[in-house]
């Protein structure tokens, strides 16, 4: 709409027909809410529609969600800081994630985290250790119980600090203990589960020399 500018009831001489509608660059469209983006990917996955999934997610995110080993989570658990979660209420799966988490940036799901079916204790422990090194709690929860992840992340991994040496996994009464030694002590990841169900890290303990 065009409007004339008046000052004290008189039209400015130099702008008798001045309008306030100077064309500007079109405003950027607001990004959709993370929950809507995540919902589109989730529905595309349920429908087995990779083409639709590719429209709202990166190729890596599409590959990840279509590799989910368990049946679909049955409850949307909301979004926090751009990460939206779908969780199980009737199926128990390994780790503390309890389903699928999607990291949303703008109009795309850029990363998918999911409860993993890990068939070797050492693989579960190694995945958790790598997630700790990266400072990625969601990746840690893929194979670690919440208490284990909370314990591990109390201290941030320092690449300039002590070096951790993996010592393998040994049987213990209820599962396996996977150990990392370092100068001054050792860290033990206590792994539970089975090859059929999948392994995860339930707790972490430390010893000092």
Image (spheres, helix red, strand yellow):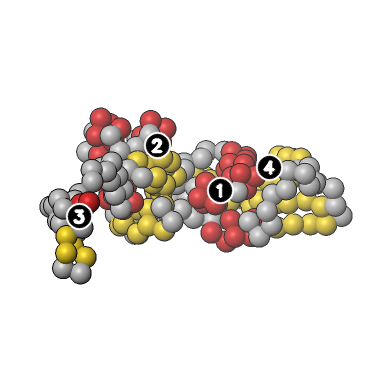
Q: Residue 125's image quarter? A: top right
Q: Nearer the viewer, mark 3 or mark 1?
A: 3
Direction front: furthest residue = 13
The residue nearer to you, when weighing 204 against 106, is: 106
Residue beneath label 3, please? 13
Q: Nearer the viewer, mark 4 or mark 2?
A: 2
Let me know if residue 142 appears in the view.
Answer: yes
Judged from the image, the secondary structure of the residue bearing numbered disc 3 is: helix
Residue beneath label 4, please? 169
Which of the marked residues, 4 or 2, is nearer the chain's N terminus?
Answer: 2
Distance CA(mark 4)–CA(mark 2): 31 Å
Residue beneath label 1, please? 136
Q: Nearer the viewer, mark 2 or mark 3?
A: 3
Which of the marked residues, 2 or 3, is nearer the chain's N terminus?
Answer: 3
Distance CA(mark 2)–CA(mark 3): 62 Å
Decide if residue 140 is on the left or right side of residue 78.
Answer: right
Which of the marked residues, 1 or 2, is nearer the chain's N terminus?
Answer: 2
Residue beneath label 2, please? 61
Q: Nearer the viewer, mark 4 or mark 3?
A: 3
Let me know if residue 71 appears in the view.
Answer: no
The quarter of the rendered structure image containing the C terminus is bottom right
Judged from the image, the secondary structure of the residue bearing numbered disc 2 is: helix
CB-based contact (under 8 Å), mark 4 and mark 2: no
Instruction: Name the residue rendered at 44%, 44% in the picture.
Output: 113
Distance CA(mark 4)–CA(mark 3): 88 Å
Residue 48: horizontal and vertical position, in percent?
A: 25, 35
Please rate how many residues cluster around mark 2, counting C-alpha atoms within 10 Å: few if below 14, some from 14 to 19, many from 20.
many
């Amino acid at each position: 709409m065009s409007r004339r500018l008046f000052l004290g009831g008189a039209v400015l001489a130099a702008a008798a027909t001045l309008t306030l509608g100077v064309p500007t660059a079109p405003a950027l469209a607001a990004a959709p809410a993370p929950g809507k983006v995540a919902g589109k990917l989730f529905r595309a996955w349920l429908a087995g529609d990779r083409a639709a999934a590719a429209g709202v997610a990166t190729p890596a995110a599409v590959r990840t969600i279509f590799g989910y080993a368990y049946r679909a989570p049955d409850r949307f658990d909301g979004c926090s800081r751009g990460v939206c979660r779908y969780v199980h209420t009737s199926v128990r799966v390994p780790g503390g994630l309890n389903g699928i988490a999607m990291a949303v940036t703008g109009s795309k799901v850029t990363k998918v985290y999911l409860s993993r079916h890990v068939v070797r204790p050492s693989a579960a422990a190694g995945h958790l250790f790598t997630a700790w090194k990266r400072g990625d709690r969601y990746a840690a929860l893929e194979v670690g119980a919440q208490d284990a992840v909370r314990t591990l992340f109390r201290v941030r991994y320092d690449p300039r600090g002590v070096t951790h040496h993996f010592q393998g996994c040994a049987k213990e009464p209820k599962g396996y203990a996977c150990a990392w030694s370092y100068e001054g002590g050792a860290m033990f990841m206590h792994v539970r589960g089975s090859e059929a169900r999948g392994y995860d890290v339930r707790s972490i303990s430390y010893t000092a020399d």
